[in-house]
Image (tube, grey):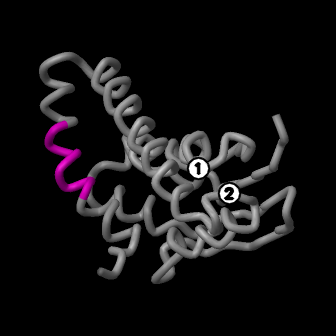
Amino acid sequence: MAEIPVLVKRRLQAQVIGPIYAEMVAQVGEEKASAILDAAIRKAAIAEGKEFAKKAPGGVTSMADFVKLYELWTADGALEVTVHEANDKVFNFDVTRCKYAESYKEMGLGKIGHLMSCNRDGTFCEGYDPNIKLERKQTIMAGASCCTFRYRYEMS
């Protein structure tokens, strides 16, 4: 069975999450609703990372295999990316256009888009390979002109 493009998957998830989030805000307030959504999405990202790690060649993850995974998130032009460096120790790039952010804004969910997508980026690594760390200083979702992704492989 073919994988659903990640952008399509995130839009479908947002159609379900949006009304649930709105009801949580009404019931428990925005701060608590955001915390609940954040925790749930982070747990889902870690679990997804673990599933992808199982599919790594020989069950052994690497930065090279992690870099290949990015094709899933960029499929169908979902992200426009400028790669600065990609090797077995670092994967540094900027996202100059993000259709995930555009989709959430179109759906009226721009305020929680970072919870549904951006927060997954580094958290996914916790499940996939905890040696891969993300440093990101800015995102398009938060209003910046680009997202700065700086992944590094650190042996623990």
Q: In the picture provided, is 70 more to the left or to the right than 31? A: right
Which amino acid type corresponds to the residue marked 2 in the rendered image?
Thr
Image-based side of 35 in relation to 86, left or right? left
Which type of secondary structure does the marked residue at label 1 adopt? helix
Chain part drawn in magenta: 13-20
**What is the residue that sits farthest to the front in this orientation?**
58
Tell me if 120 is positioned left or right of 133 in this view.
left
Front residue of 61/133: it is 61
Residue drawn where x is 33% and y is 81% of the image: 2
Q: How many marks?
A: 2
Residue 127 image point, x, y percent: 55, 43
At a point 35% along the width and 34% down the height, the residue shown is 40
Proximity of marks 2 and 1: CB atoms separated by less than 8 Å: yes
Q: Residues within 10 Å of mark 2 (few under 14, many from 20)?
A: some
Return the x and y of residue 153 as percentages of the image width and height. 81, 49
Task: Reply above or below: 42 against 108.
Answer: above
User: Which mark is on residue 128?
Assistant: 1
Q: Which residue is mark 2?
A: 61
Q: Quadrant of residue 22?
A: top left
